[in-house]
């Protein structure tokens, strides 16, 4: 009687659904109360510095020579005529500017006012 064989019930297979928890929109904060600091200045004893006498008066005559003026540059000869000059008729490298699409009338009015100013 004490050893009863309990029947084993077969459990059908099942899937537990995935659970997603989004923590990206949590507004979490913390308040930190700081103590009030009070600064009390202290006097620091310093040594007494005696009065330092100023420099003695000096009567000196200084002769500063005049600064020479630079001479004007020499006259250069004309460029010789045998140096060939080259003229190039090259097409423009840049393509034409793209057409600006029509804008809202409000923006065009602002641009006209800016152009007038």
Image (tube, grey):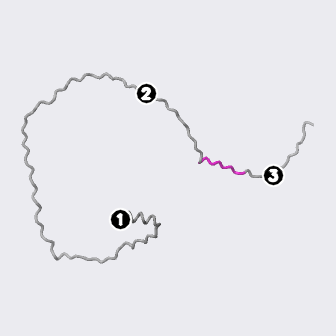
Q: Earlier in the sequence, mark 3 or mark 2?
A: 3
Name the image quarter holding the C terminus. bottom left
User: Taking 36 as reference, is 100 above or below it?
Assistant: below
Q: Earlier in the sequence, mark 1 or mark 3?
A: 3
Q: Residues within 10 Å of mark 3 (few under 14, many from 20)?
A: few
Tag nearer the camera, 1 or 2:
1
The residue to which callout 3 is attached is 12
- Principal secondary structure, stretch drawn in magenta: loop
Indicate whether residue 19 is drawn in magenta: yes
Q: Residue at x 7, y 36 (%)?
A: 60
Q: Residue at x 49, y 30 (%)?
A: 35
Q: Position of residue 34 (x, y in %)?
A: 50, 32
Residue 38's disc number: 2
Tell me whether the residue at label 1 lies in contact with that at label 2, contact meaning CB atoms closer than 8 angstroms. no
Indicate whether residue 7 is drawn in magenta: no
User: Taking 24 as reference, is 86 above or below it?
Assistant: below
Name the image quarter holding residue 57. top left
Q: Residue at x 40, y 25 (%)?
A: 40
Q: Position of residue 10 (x, y in %)?
A: 84, 49
Name the image quarter holding the N terminus. top right
Cα–Cα span, label 1 and label 2: 61 Å
Residue 116's disc number: 1
Q: Position of residue 41 (x, y in %)?
A: 37, 25
Task: State the SS at label 3.
Answer: loop
Q: Could you tell whether 105 is left or right of 116 in the image?
A: right
Q: Residues within 10 Å of mark 1 (few under 14, many from 20)?
A: few
**Start and end of the magenta stretch?**
17-24
Cα–Cα span, label 1 and label 3: 82 Å
């Amino acid at each position: 009687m004490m050893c009863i064989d309990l029947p084993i019930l077969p459990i059908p297979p099942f899937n537990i659904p995935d659970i997603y928890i989004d923590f990206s929109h949590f507004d979490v904060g913390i308040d930190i109360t700081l103590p009030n600091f009070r600064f009390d200045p202290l006097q620091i004893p310093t040594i007494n510095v005696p009065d330092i006498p100023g420099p003695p008066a000096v009567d000196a005559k200084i002769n500063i020579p005049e600064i020479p003026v630079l001479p004007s540059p020499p006259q250069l000869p004309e460029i010789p005529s045998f140096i060939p000059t080259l003229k190039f008729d090259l097409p423009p490298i840049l393509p034409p500017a793209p057409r600006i699409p029509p804008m809202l009338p409000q923006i065009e009015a602002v641009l006209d006012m800016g152009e007038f100013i």
